[in-house]
């Protein structure tokens, strides 16, 4: 316990006075894996991505989407691989 903070006295006089732990409680609760706090929500990005609008043929999009989640990342990797073998000029 932090030495700067004093212990809060319990307001529960009996064990039955404890609040029920419902689904809402567990949705707000922190989750740990060992000693590490698991952060909620979307992980922080690299900050290097640029949002844009690009039009691709429907069959190209369907082929990447067929691979499941992460299709945009796979498409980015495919474009990066193409650039590594072709001049960007």
Image: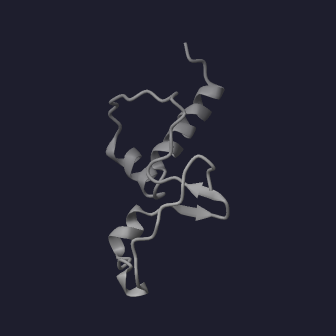
The C terminus lies in which quarter of the figure? top right
Q: Position of residue 58 (x, y in %)?
A: 32, 45
Left or right relative to 84: residue 52: left
Left or right relative to 78: residue 50: left
Look at 46% across and 44% down and name the residue there: 72
Look at 49% across and 41% down and name the residue there: 75
Above or below, 38 against 43 in this view is: below
Q: Position of residue 82 (x, y in %)?
A: 58, 31
Please name the colour scheme applied to the rendered image: one colour
The N terminus lies in which quarter of the figure? bottom right
Q: Position of residue 19 (x, y in %)?
A: 35, 77
Q: How many numbered badges does the structure rendering display?
A: 0
In depth, the one of 50 and 19 nearer the eye is: 19
In depth, the one of 80 and 46 nearer the eye is: 46
- Residue 87: which quarter of the image? top right
Look at 46% across and 56% down and name the residue there: 69
- From this viewpoint, which residue is outermost toward the top? 89
Q: Position of residue 44 (x, y in %)?
A: 50, 40
Look at 61% across and 23% down and name the residue there: 86
In depth, the one of 3 and 41 nearer the eye is: 3
Left or right relative to 37: residue 11: left
Above or below, 1 against 89 in this view is: below
């Amino acid at each position: 316990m932090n030495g700067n903070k004093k212990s809060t006295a319990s307001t529960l006089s009996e064990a039955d006075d404890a609040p029920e732990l419902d689904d809402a409680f567990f949705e707000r609760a922190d989750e740990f894996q060992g000693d590490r706090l698991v952060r909620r929500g979307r992980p922080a990005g690299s900050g290097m991505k640029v949002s844009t609008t690009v039009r691709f043929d429907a069959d190209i999009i369907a082929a990447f989407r067929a691979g499941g989640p992460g299709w945009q990342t796979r498409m980015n990797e495919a474009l990066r691989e193409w650039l590594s073998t072709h001049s960007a000029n």
